[in-house]
Image (tube, rainbow, N blue to C red):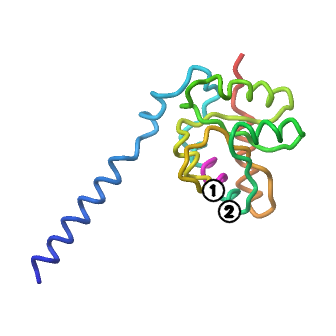
Amino acid sequence: MTKVKKEKGINEEAGATETGGTEKSYLELIANINPIANPLATKKLSKKLYKCVKKASKLKQIRRGVKEVQKFINKGETGIVVLAGDTLPIDVYCHLPVMCEDRSLPYAYIPSKVDLGSSAGSKRPTCVIMIKSHEDYKEAYDECFDEVSALPKPL
């Protein structure tokens, strides 16, 4: 019996190191971003945005994907636009920051589309998400809104 317990302990430790090893650090993710990914959210702001996306997705208050986000920006919907900085080719979504600036919507780039998709509750990577305001997560939304609005816009 003791051998079985020891083997389980060894397997658990190996599993823990494997999952920790697959997750990339913020600095590793920044190395893969596009040249147009500006303003880039800081590590702290990225975590706040992921949490806000997770809360919004539970309440169905997000717009996911280039086509859907573009459609609702054109219709006049407001919210925070979160773009993934590692999307290639950049032609897929390079028009969205201009649309956001025209309609004075706050937007920010985060380093990973995989993390953005997983925070929205999807297994697929997502390159763009719009977070809509809702009363249930108003504090987190307002905090993210203020910090994203304060980011310096590119020239």
Q: Quadrant of the C terminus?
A: top right
Lateral position of residue 65 relative to residue 125, left or right: right
Residue 67 versus residue 14 in the image, above or below: above
Main SS of the magenta part reads helix
Labelled pair 2, 1 in contact (Cβ < 8 Å): yes
Magenta segment boundaries in residue numbering: 48-53
Q: Residue at x 60, y 36 (%)?
A: 84
Kindly give the residue lying farthest to the bottom in the view shown.
1
Residue depicted at x 83% and y 37%: 73
- The count of marks equals 2
The foreground one among 35 and 155 is 35
In front of the other: 27 or 73: 73
Q: Which residue carries the number 1 mark?
A: 54
Residue type, numbered disc 1: Lys
Query: Residue under circle 2?
Result: 58
Q: Quadrant of residue 140?
A: bottom right
